[in-house]
Structure formats: structure tokens, C-alpha cells
Image (spheres, helix red, strand yellow):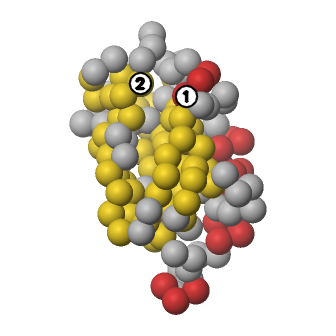
Amino acid sequence: MMKIVAVRPWALGIGGLIMLIAGCGKPAAELPPLGKVSGVVTLNGEPLPKAAIFFVPTDAEDQASNAVTDEAGRYELQFAGNQPGALIGSHRVEIRTGGEGYDDEGNFFETRERLPPQYHAQSRLTAEVAEGSNEINFDLKGR
């Protein structure tokens, strides 16, 4: 049975706000400078699939980039919905595994957050994005 995972309503609101502020489909000439960002997220040495990762610029006025890890824990950040990358500069990083949604039969389910708060709500993770390609991996420890 396939499960469809949806993000909590507050996360959808944040995503919608990001899209509203950034605008959809901006021409490349209108975008701020971006660096391409990819990497792997592991938990206790094992790939962490289906984790939402957010790069939030330390300048609160700027937009965040986000991605979801694949089965091997790999991610590639997206900015403003369809532009690959993240703003150049310093970022606070949040990684989340919890969520809610409906399965194929329409039954509601909720997935428990598997990561300690220091990786999401009280994140201590940081990253520096430079011009060009950036490979930024996260080896998390926890439950």
C-alpha cells in the first residue's frame, strides 16, 4: 500500500509565502545569485529518505530553499519553486521527517518526527553556500 505524505499545514503556508514573495517563473536575470546545492543526509550512518530539508538564509528578509531526500538520502535544493540552488551566503538548516497525509484508501495517518529538535525546531545546523556547485552533506545522530 502506497502512502502519500503531506506536510503539516504550517509548512504549506511557509512554502506558499516563499512562492508569493519570490514569484513563480521569474526570468533568470531577475533572480538573486544562487549556488547549486546537493548532498546526502544520513542518520546514524544510514541514508535518511523522505526528509524535508530547508536552507533558511541568516538574513531573515531572504527566501529559503528546500528539497526532499530520495531513498538514498540525496537531495538537490530548489529556490522559488523551480530554480535549482540556494542564495549565496550563510544559512540555518532545518531537517524534518514528520508529516501527515492520506493513504490510497483515504485513511488519515501521521508520521512521527524521528529527529531530535536540534535538527529542526531548534536547529543548530548551518551551511555556507558559495557560487557554483556545493556539496553539503549532513551526518545526523539520534534516535
User: x and y percent of residue 19 in the render?
Assistant: 64, 66
Left or right, residue 37 beside residue 64: left
Left or right, residue 110 beside residue 132: right
Left or right, residue 105 beside residue 70: right
Q: Nearer the viewer, residue 26 or 104?
A: 26
Instruction: Please give the name of the residue rendered at 55% of the width and 18% of the height, measured from the top-left corner.
Output: 116
Q: Which SS class for mark 2?
A: strand
Residue 97, numbered label: none
User: x and y percent of residue 54 in the render?
Assistant: 54, 46
Q: In this picture, is 82 found above or below 120?
A: below
- Whole-angstrom CA distance, mark 2 to mark 1, is 8 Å
Q: Nearer the viewer, residue 42 or 7?
A: 42
Instruction: Please give the name of the residue rendered at 65% of the width and 44% of the height, measured from the top-left corner.
Output: 11
User: x and y percent of residue 112 in the render?
Assistant: 54, 19
Instruction: Please give the name of the residue rendered at 48% of the width and 85% of the height, measured from the top-left corner.
Output: 28
- Badge 2 or badge 1: first in the primary sequence: 1
Q: In this picture, is 8 found above or below 110?
A: below
Q: Nearer the viewer, residue 57 or 114?
A: 57
Left or right, residue 58 beside residue 38: right
Instruction: Please give the name of the residue rendered at 24% of the width and 36% of the height, measured from the top-left corner.
Output: 72
Query: Number of numbered discs present?
Result: 2
Q: Quadrant of the N terminus?
A: top left
Q: Say what amino acid the circle numbered 2 marks.
A: Leu
Q: Residue furthest left?
A: 72
Callout 2 touching callout 1 (CB < 8 Å): yes
Q: Which SS class for mark 1?
A: helix
Q: Say what amino acid the circle numbered 1 marks.
A: Tyr
Name the residue tied to disc 2.
Answer: 140
Name the residue tied to disc 1.
Answer: 119
Category of crowding for the residue at label 1, using alpha-carbon neighbours closer than 10 angstroms: few (below 14), some (14–19), many (at least 20): some
User: x and y percent of residue 138 in the render?
Assistant: 39, 35
Q: Nearer the viewer, residue 55 or 113?
A: 55
